Image (spheres, helix red, strand yellow):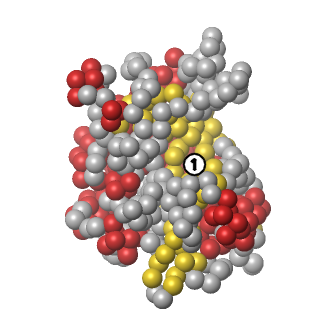
Amino acid sequence: MAQQALPVMYDAPAPNSGLTPAGEVFMRADWTTFKVLSYSPGHARVFTYIFNDGRPWTQCPRSFLSKVIKKALKYNLSLKVAFENEFYLLKLKDGMVQPFDQSLFAQTYALDNANTVITDIINALSAQEIYPEMLYAESGSGQFEIPVRYTDVLGAADQQIAFKETVRGIAQKFDNVIASFVPKLFSDKAGSGAHLHFSLWEDEKNITPSSSNNKIISKKAQSFIAGILFHLPALMCLTTPSTNSYKRIKPRFWSGAYQCWGYGNREAAIRIPQTDGTNPITNIELKTVDPTCNPYLAIGVMISAGLDGLEKKMKLGNPVNKDPADLTKDELLEENINLLPSNLGQAIDHFKKDRVILDMLGKDLAQSFLAVRKAEWEAMKDFSIEEESKILLERY
């Protein structure tokens, strides 16, 4: 049981987690998720639920997400979800970690230079029925982005675990190569996010776009987004849960530092990706998510917040069509646009006060999760990026 309460710095339960070295829980395989690992001959992977005394454990993240999925069905609502991951390829030289190359955004040299590694990653993902839809060199030197095809909610969380393990597993097959998903690995280079894309469905129909104008979002999507934005300061404790996460989330860095939304606006926390021609809007993007999150918890609380918006018929504010950092204080106040938490401590404070999210997680899971975040915040709140990276580099 105590494994649920381990912070990133050491292998011991965080204080006040409610968990001790005494007690055992047991994994039960979901055999529908069984996959042979092409990149690790003789090995396979299967995802599990965690049981305690013959019942789903109150602290099992996969069981938590399953509970949220069932709640959404009461609203006749299902979702399609996908993560959009960024990561760095690094090389070890004379004991020092360096970017794989010195390329710039979208430079084809980066793809040519890392062709063997990237091709093996793509093939290994595809062999697990995780289908990459795009590949390009991101802003940071040696940084890449590989969005994958959407799937059902639980499958998307499983895919996120498998994606990260596959990328890291492939990189390890090459001499002196490391793949890392640390949100802010270098102070002078772009951070790595894991933007969460989702669409809302009723009776096998995508209801994200409005039925009267498919270039704007529907009323239900508006209330769902309003719920996410309302709870976002607390959600960030789960979607961007490391101290390092907040080194990435800054104004003017396309990381979603403001509590607002917009069509095609990469500075807003929630962006509605736009399409060309007659194609309709299809999905919604939550930008304040990174690869240090537990995907079962991150997706689960995001949906819970959206359902709260539906239940309370929350009204969505106006879309923001410019960089919020360019607005005056009066304009920000008039549009009710706020900066989101700038460190994990602030997100923890919001999380502790959010009854909707706490109640959905349940007392046990909320307690252990909060204990871990507090332990990490207290231990690492004054760390520089370089100090964090020494600990996190091969954790994430």
User: Dot 1 corresponds to which residue?
Assistant: 83
Residue 299: x %, y % from top left? 50, 44
Image quadrant where residue 172 sits? bottom right
Going by the numbered disc 1, the residue's amino acid type is: Phe
Name above or below for residue 222 compared with residue 391: above
Asked if residue 285 lies left or right of residue 377, the reply is right
Whether residue 315 is situated above or below residue 103 in the rendered picture: above
What residue sits 57% from the left and 70% below the top?
A: 101
Q: Residue drawn 26% across and 42% down?
A: 350
- Quick one: label 1, few (<14), some, or many (20+) residues within 10 Å? many
User: Image quadrant for the N terminus?
Assistant: bottom left
Task: Let me know if residue 99 appears in the view.
Answer: yes
**Residue 271 located left or right of residue 244:** right
**Residue at x 53% of width, y 32% of height:** 264
245 or 99: nearer the eye? Answer: 99
Residue 327 vertical placement versus 128 (above, below): above
Q: Which residue reaches farthest bottom? A: 94
Compared to residue 276, the image places residue 384 above or below, namely: below
Residue 238 is at least partly visible in this image: no
Q: Residue at x 67, y 43 (%)?
A: 151
Where is residue 203 drawn, in percent x and y? 68, 24
State the image coordinates of residue 178 (x, y, percent, origin top left).
Answer: 55, 75
* Image position of 308 (left or right of 144): left
The number of numbered discs placed on residues in the rendered structure image is 1
- Please state the horizontal and vertical placement of residue 292, each as a whole percent of the image: 45, 59
- Mark 1 residue element: strand
| Residue at the farthest top position | 212
